Amino acid sequence: MTAIEQVGRRPGAGWDVLASDGSVVRIRPLREDDEPALDAMNQRVSDRSIYLRFFGISRSLADEHTHHLASDRDGHVALVAEYGDRLVGVASYEPLRTGEAEMAFLLEDSVHGRGIGTLLLEQLAAVARENGIQRLRADTLAENAGMLRVFADSGFEQVRRLDSGVVELVVDTAYRPSTLERMADRERAAEDRSLHRLFSPRAVAVIGAGRAPGGIGHEILRNIVKGKFTGPVYAVNPHADRVADVPSYPSIVDVPGVVDLAVIAVPAEQVRQVLADCGAKGVGGAVVLTAGFSELGAAGRTMQREILEIARRHSIRLIGPNCLGLVNTDPAITLNATFAEVVPTPGALAIAAQSGAVGIAVLDQAARTGLGISEFVSLGNKVDVSGNDLLLHWWGDPRTAVIGLYLESFGNPRKFGGLARLVGRAKPILVVKGGRSVGGRRAGVSHTAAAATPETAVDALFAQSGVLRMDTVEELVETARVLAVRPQPRGRRLAVIGNAGGAGVLAADAAGRLGLDLPELSPAVQRELAAVGAVGSGNPVDLGAAASPTSLARALRVVADSGEVDAVLVCYAATRAGRVADIYAAIAESAAQADVPIIVNCVGAVHAAPEVSLADGRRLPVFSFPESAVRALAHAVRYAEWRSRPQGVVPELARVDAVGARAVVRWFLQRNPDGGWLEPLRTGQLLQCAGVSAIPVLAASSRSEAIGAAESAGYPVALKTAASGVVHKTDIGGVRVGLANSVEVAAAYDEVTAAAGDPQVVVQAMAPGGTELVIGVVRDRLFGPLLMAGSGGILTDLLADRQWRGLPLTDLDATEMVHALHCAPLLAGYRGAEAADQEAVLDVIHRIAWLAEQVPELAELDINPLIAGPSGAFAVDVRMRLTPATPEPDWYARRMRGDQP
């Protein structure tokens, strides 16, 4: 099979991507029947472009090359770009030698400047990488500034050499962090342009707006009008001239002027024709409220695919179907295109929800608390616009300070994680993940697979990408209220101050549970507090039930300016000694110049405002309960810590052998086409390829072989059952350790084989003393390899002391995994014991991550235990399961939803 045939047979071959102007381009493998279309493109291309591509003006040479690409089967790969109804570009590579190929590009002049050349380069590099090509070469005329700029701006590492007016380029196809950042920057700009007409339309049409109140179309039209949308609003209803006092037209094509956004509320079977009409009209965005698509089964999924195809053909961005609508509170737009009764208020939270009901709950809670929203999207079935698209859109939105998501599923979780790492450096991302359940626990034989629940991968993804996971919508809104106000906490030191002693105690208890510190204030600060009337000046600071607004303001300034705390919680119980309005004014006065965050818990004032307004426009959140305030602040502290830490790097490892690892896998799968558990010898070989130190394992199937193995290993030894399917060897009496001579080995062999009912055993020299850990891998279909580190040996399941991370694994990720374990103090040298070599433990974790990356066939891996001692870390008991694997999809390539694997 040729390389181009391999590409053509990949699942979902052909990908919709966004050009730099936000329009949709289709990138797909070249087909034989494309030759006439490419010949026609060659005729449209200018002489200048022909010259720059072929180093001379020869259209016959261009046609010959087209024929070669479409007809020959010599291992080359060619991709074409479709724009509208024609081919506008072609990119190809020709293999030169192992791991290397020569690439070439030709674009129609009419699409220059739209980023299509860059898209072709990205996709060609992805296909090349999948086919084992590490380097792409190109000879480009030095005067071809446009193409040289494409290469230079791509983010791919490259080497250039100028010779006789020709630039010789070598491009590395690997994804480096800088490559992914450049790709994300380009994708963000394209998404902004693509979604602009959805969120900032010049005119809106509601298609299917009925005359009678109560219908979805009618109510959404009324909401748009009542919300004072700043542009023209039209109804589309063939049976009415006006709907809700808005002009109505028979079809969208009959509406005068430009229409950027169509809100569609017609029966499901009519949506296809309506979208086609929108395409003819030049509509840029559509919100499909209609249900009856993928949520109803196979027939609905077919209709959903068809409406996506129509939308892509016309570069229409699609929200829904089966959704509530969207909101933009920008005063220049003021668009409420939902049929919810809640009136959205302007604010700093951007929110997307897969559930319409959850979306309404967020809108309501945000309005009640004074937080407000910048934009809201009800995702529905997510046929096109997804959470990843919105992350890119909100990344640079100046009105959005906090991003909130309610998600029930992930289309491309690895890309989400990569984007979240980038976006999270600018603004926090809060997620409520629905659908938690232990019912999907994996059926696995290894400790790692048995421990991996459906939520394990999600928690690992969020931990690495800085996403704050919320348990409830209420918690999301409360946390967003704290994160939306500057400054953010610089540490974990919290001061609690107020006139409500009981509330202060509850706050202190909550802080302790959530990992915040309440430091004892210095004697100097306590003297100042006593001078302003504090009856308890440690921390919490109790001002007494009769505290006046003036004493509160003075005490708050003392604590906030002390430099001894990173945040302040004011707990105030409304009394006759001070009006709530006066208390708010005192807090506002003291907070105006404070360089630490201040939040408020107000008790006993039912009608108190949910915020304290400052003169500079900032609004301090007011909570009804102290525990809620502390919980929200603890999330803000976690985010601030994540944001301030280094991003980490994936270490470059020495002493690894990828070729050798592939050879072991190939040997095993040739003999076991369905996969299975590796025997100890092959397991050891794979560990050796990864550079992991292991205690050698000797197999035996008789008493005499066991004795011989023990003498070869050197006494004392351990003897263990090698019976298949046994995970917990100690539970069945399948382990004997510290065997000092042949008599003990013989007796141990008889006992272990009798207990296991299997003559197969393994013998090892006793490992040096140390802390027992478990290191594991399990491969998730969507999330990819998941790494586990935890307490090992018999404690693995007893304590459930585990940490999970996904790939790529940075040095910081690995360090956090180990330091977060309950057994971490043992590694550091507990109560005078000699510390373990933690660098060796981290090295093993990175080498197992490397193995999981290099061997996609690795379905499960357990090292249990890994002995961590002062002299290093040594794998003792290792199990690996291999399965046949198809090439990993390119999770980071720029591809629109619906084309993702």
Image (cartoon, helix red, strand yellow):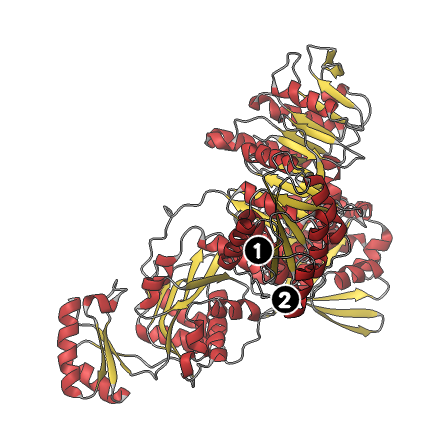
* Residue at the spot of label 2: 645
At mark 2, the secondary structure is: loop
Residue at the location (75% across, 47% down)?
A: 618
Q: Position of residue 32 (x, y in %)?
A: 62, 47
Q: Secondary structure at mark 1?
A: helix
- Is 441 drawn above or below residue 176 in the view shown? above
Residue 676 in the image, given as x and y percentages of width and height? 32, 62
- Where residue 533 sits, quadrant-wise, is bottom right
Q: Nearer the viewer, residue 270 or 799?
A: 799
Residue contact between numbered discs 1 and 2, judged by CB atoms under 8 Å:
no
Looking at the picture, tell me which residue is in the foreground, 16 or 550. 550
Residue 84 circle label:
none
Residue 735 vs residue 284, the one in the foreground: 735
Label 1 environment density (alpha carbons within 10 Å; few <14, some 14–19, many ≥20): many
Q: Which residue is mark 1?
A: 634
Above or below 277: residue 375: below
Disc 2 residue type? Arg
Would you say 27 lies left or right of 787 here? Answer: right
Please tell me which residue is depicted at 67% across the width and 65% down the height of the picture: 527
Q: Is residue 680 visible?
A: yes
Q: Going by the image, does 102 lie left or right of 773? A: right
